Image: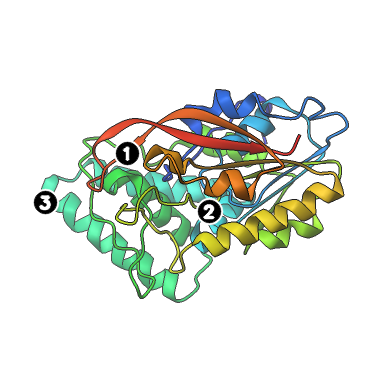
Amino acid sequence: MSQLYINANARPFVKWAGGKSQILDEIRAKYPHELGRRIKKYAEPFVGGGAVLFDVLNHYSVEEAYISDINRELVHAYATIRDNPADLIEALREIEIGYHTADDENRKELYYANRDKFNSLKFMLDTSVELVALFIFLNRTCFNGLYRVNSKGGYNVPQGSYRMPSICDENNIRAVSSKLQEVTIVHGDYRRAADFIDNETFAYFDPPYRPLSTTANFTSYAQNGFDDNSQAELAAFINELTVRGAYILVSNSDPTNTDEADNFFDILYASYRITRIQASRAINSIGNGRGKVRELLIANG
């Protein structure tokens, strides 16, 4: 790997619902003071787009890092970028040239043909570079960068309206590959991180947010939801890690945005430090209305 990419800052290679780039300053302010010294390890069991992951890897010399997610295709994308960036770049460049040079009608045909091909490979549990290239292509060209599946697990997001979307960002892919070289990448439930997280670990948890209303339109990237019981189970797991001496930071929605009496997380994390921050998010069921809403940062230290 060229020294150019080893020293370059990496950033998320996909757009992801609930991404943390816009509130990274507030999250960074909650990092443990001993990160990179006494705290030598980093874990992110709901990695998503990885904005916090890359911020940590760009600025701190951690000895070990661990990421996981239940989205199989996302995890394969991370692993492929780490292990085989050259072939992925070649595949993405070919897709990008074809898409950029097509007219609107042919672009539409290309998008849906590639979506069908992605789903076909996905259902075969394919692990090829082609699957990852299609995953990134769809992310960069679909409506709002969403990852949503239907009841059968098929990716079903329609085409977005972008004139010249960036599909092959070679410099960032190589920078990401460099940063991921010493990172353990796991497909699975957050509980699998238990074997990694100890008293030298900073662990950031960004689970699916609790909906702010019963009619909220939240995008699912897995077939199974994450309800209040799941939130409580996660809190119990975090309590276990706190007893071990790990430094924990959790993000979630603030229920008091829509119901001042809803103190679900204040009760669930009563022994933790809860900070309310402002974030710009979609705030209606259509998804194109945006505004400031409060989110929670929950820390045990």
Measure how far apart labels 1 and 3 are at the Cα level.
30 Å
Q: For the image shown, how many numbered marks are present on the structure? A: 3
**Quarter that holds the N terminus:** top right
The amino acid beneath tag 2 is Ala
Determine which residue is flagged by label 2. 77
Determine which residue is flagged by label 1. 282
The amino acid beneath tag 3 is Glu
Residue 14 in sight here: no
Q: Where is residue 211 in the image (x, y as percent from the top left)?
A: 41, 51
Which secondary structure lies at badge 1? Answer: strand
Q: Position of residue 247 (x, y in %)?
A: 77, 39
**Quarter that holds the C terminus:** top right
The mark lying in front, picked from 3 and 2, is 2
Determine which residue is flagged by label 3. 105
The mark lying in front, picked from 2 and 1, is 1
Q: Residue at x 43, y 45 (%)?
A: 16
In the shown orientation, is residue 110 left or right of residue 120? left
Residue 159 in sight here: yes
Task: Give the class, few, some or many, for how many residues have Cα within 10 Å of label 1's Cα (few <14, many ≥20).
Answer: some
Q: Which residue is drawn at 30% across and 44% down?
A: 144
- The numbered disc on residue 1 is none
Measure how far apart labels 2 and 1 are at the Cα level.
26 Å
Q: Residue at x 36, y 59 (%)?
A: 148
Reading the chain from its start, which is encountered first: label 3 or label 2?
A: 2
Which secondary structure lies at badge 3? Answer: helix
Label 3–label 2 contact, CB within 8 A: no
Measure how far apart labels 3 and 2 are at the Cα level.
29 Å
Q: Where is residue 125 in the image (x, y as percent from the top left)?
A: 50, 73
Q: Position of residue 70 (x, y in %)?
A: 55, 62
Q: In this view, does 212 lie above or below 26?
A: below
